[in-house]
């Protein structure tokens, strides 16, 4: 069974909620989901052994939190080339972080990113049926790429 890692940062719980829907979507698609906080990933080795990767991150000050930046610097040495990937996050007005992460997965890590691009969910819509389904569909597309 293909195994997908969902790793996310969330200061106020919205992106964490999206991560739960992503994990659900992975299971619905018939894959195994594992969730890990970036702080639990201590070395590039902790990123090995997965077929696909979903990075969740909210936008603060038009940027991603330092924890996610540090994780991405570590992930550079984890041999993610050719692995399936995607990025998502909650935001209110600009939603820069998932886009930046997605760019890094595609252009720096050379991952096989989903054709859906990054999934940015406006905070007020997190938990609505429309966006629960969007998360499930997004997770499915990463499973299919894996
Ligand atoms: C101090 C502060 C700065 C923020 N900056 C941005 C921003 O630059 N762009 C944006 O789209 N949202 C911004 N937001 C909104 C957050 O991205 C939004 O509340 C998001 O849902 C938080 O996700 P989380 O609950 O997973 O931490 C900001 C929120 C706070 C409190």
Image: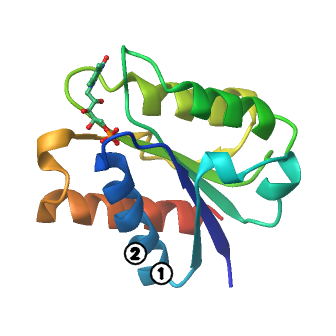
Across and down, in percent, residue 97 comes to: 44, 27
Q: Which residue is mark 1?
A: 27
Across and down, in percent, residue 13 comes to: 31, 49
Q: Which mark is residue 24?
A: 2
- Comparing 70 with 128, the one in front is 70
For the point 60% across and 33% down, the residue is 67
Q: Secondary structure at mark 1?
A: helix
For the point 38% across and 39% down, the residue is 11
Please tell me in which quadrant of the rendered image residue 62 appears: top left
Q: Is residue 13 above or below residue 19?
A: above
Please tell me in which quadrant of the rendered image residue 119 appears: top left
10 Å neighbourhood of mark 2: few (<14), some, or many (≥20)?
Answer: many
Number of residue marks: 2
Q: Is residue 78 above or below residue 96?
A: below
Decide: marks 2, 1 in contact (CB < 8 A)? yes
For the point 13% across and 65% down, the residue is 129
Across and down, in percent, residue 4 comes to: 62, 67
Determine the quadrant in which ligand 1 lies: top left
Tell me if 108 is positioned left or right of 6 in this view. right
In the rendered image, the quadrant that contains the C terminus is bottom right
For the point 24% across and 65% down, the residue is 133
- Comparing 114 with 105, the one in front is 105
Q: Secondary structure at mark 2?
A: helix
Across and down, in percent, residue 20 comes to: 38, 66
- Comparing 57 with 130, the one in front is 57
């Amino acid at each position: 069974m293909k195994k997908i890692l969902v790793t996310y940062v969330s200061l106020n719980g919205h992106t964490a909620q999206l991560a739960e829907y992503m994990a659900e979507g992975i299971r619905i698609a018939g894959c195994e989901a594992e969730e890990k906080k970036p702080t639990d990933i201590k070395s590039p080795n902790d990123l090995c052994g997965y077929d696909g990767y979903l990075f969740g991150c909210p936008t603060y000050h038009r940027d991603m939190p330092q924890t996610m930046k540090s994780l991405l610097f570590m992930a550079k040495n984890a041999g993610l080339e050719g692995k399936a990937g995607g990025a998502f996050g909650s935001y209110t007005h600009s939603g820069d972080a998932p886009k930046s992460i997605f760019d890094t997965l595609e252009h720096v890590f050379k991952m096989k990113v989903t054709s859906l691009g990054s999934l940015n969910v406006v905070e007020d819509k997190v938990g609505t049926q429309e966006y629960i389904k969007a998360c499930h569909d997004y997770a499915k597309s990463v499973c299919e790429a894996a």
